Amino acid sequence: MTASGPISLSLAENVRFLQDTFGTSTDFYSKPLNIGGIDCRIVLFTGLSSPEKLTVMMLSILSQQREAFADGPALARHLLRESLIPTESAPITTREEMIERLANGLTLLLIEGCPVAVTVSSQEMPQRSVSEPDGEGNMYGPQEAFTEQLRTNISLLRRQFRTGTLVVERHDAHNHARTEYCLCYDRARAPADTVDMLRRKLDAAHLPVLLDSSYFASFLKQDKLNLFPAAAYTVRPATACARLCEGKVVILVAGSPCAMVIPSFFAEHFECLDDYSSGAVFAGLIRLLKYLAFTVAVFGPGFYVMAMTFTPEIIPIKLLASLAEAESRTPLPPMLEMLTVTLLLEIVREAGLRAPKSISHTVSIVGALIIGETAVSAGIVSVPVLTMAAAATIATLAVPSLYEQSILFRFAAILLAGLFGVPGIACCALLILAMACGSDPFGYDYLYPLMPPSRASWRDGFVRSIWSRLAQGDG
């Protein structure tokens, strides 16, 4: 028997198909029983469904029903329409649906002489409890994070978004595991053409495996060479709810605590929940500092290399003398020196991130000693280069959602500045600007509301206005 096709009228044939499919699995559970004179069989996965819960919820109720049924379809109609058992409203008619429901933690009731199977809600999957987010630090606002359970994430989102306009569409990915994902949007605010386009793009995505919502990112980008992200990501239901109120679409994937938000704009990477909980003046200052940090992270090391190699006249005399003295003790030119330090810092970061927690701190300390004191004492790198590279690395952490782009742009700026000087770093800046201007997420301007400058740029762009003005809308 193949995995496709309708459910057979023969109970023995249906059981044989499931045993051939899952019979060697130790967590596959099957139990025959007789209900109202009709032979039936319960099948489930013990790790996903609870036999104890099923016994309390279902079998005790059925044992009290002494009536006989004419045939299998009559028993199925009774269970679906009249019984107190929490069954799904729609019965299963195909073998493919049987496999899918079992994998989702539901219990199947197969009935002799019936071409459909009844599904019973008895899920009891082990799961991580809702905890505080560890990737998006905020002082104010809800302190909840998404988990790996799709149904739990939907409930967290719906608890924040308490209106009847929230739509949650369930889909199956085109991969071997048939992973579930959901499109969440507010039908009163999200543009219908954007939702339709996104639905078509995701349906056309064929993946060997889907473990996170970020796997969809490359299928959503118009220009594959554009380094700016096509979507934003969040682990906070509150942030996802705020984006839904803006008319955006949130994608949740089963097994992933990270939600994808589409479309995404450049300015949103510099925003956080605390911006709207703090005073407008302080929030505006912090947001400007983030833009400055991003600029330093990308162009700081390249500007240092350019100044030391091609344009030392722009450096004050006293500072230039100190920098020249430090550079004279090192064997490498500024460009290679900066590239070496930046690469070493990235290696230390990656080692500390991937290493087990028990030794991650040791890796960071050893890396700091080697790159810091030892390298400077040995004369391999100079103190100014190490200081600039460290400052750029710290500045990168101020905008964590653009970390990958900051690193790639930084290497490009160092190389172009070291090879061509002022024209090189100017070309790097123009290239980054061209990528930002060329990004067109679902027909929207990626640089909105920053460019072109307008009232919106100062309303909630570079800085933010007070809440009494934000509440008045775009007008």
Image: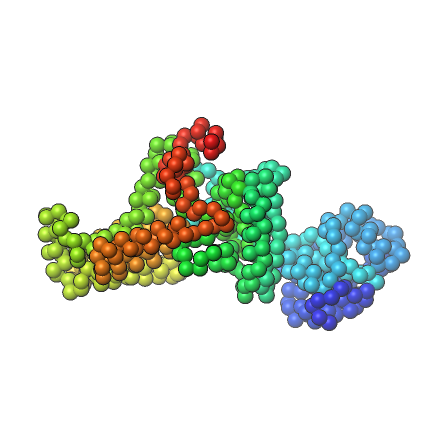
Is 276 on the left or on the right of 257, as rendered?
left
Residue located 77% across and 47% down the image: 84
Q: In this view, does 112 lie above or below 54?
A: below
Compare residues 30 and 301 and report the one nearer the observer.
301
**26 versus 260 height, above or below:** below
Q: Which residue is drawn at 32% across and 62% down?
A: 347
One can see residue 13 in this view: yes
Total number of numbered labels?
A: 0
Identify the residue shown where x is 18% and y is 64%.
Answer: 332
Q: Where is residue 9 in the image (x, y as percent from the top left)?
A: 81, 64
Q: In this view, does 410 lie to the left or right of 254?
A: left
Question: Where is residue 152 shown, x and y percent of the image?
Answer: 58, 48
Q: Which of 232 and 114 is in front in this view?
A: 232
x then y, percent, for residue 234: 47, 48
Note whether residue 362 is visible.
no
- The quadrant in which the N terminus is found is bottom right
Percent position of residue 463, x then y? 37, 36
165 is higher (above) or lower (below) than 36: above
Q: What residue do we see at 34% from left, 58% from top?
A: 408
Please state if 234 lies on the left or on the right of 319 as rendered. Answer: right
Task: Farthest residue to the top: give it.
Answer: 468
Report the coloring of the rendering.
rainbow
Of residues 188 and 252, the one nearer the viewer is 188
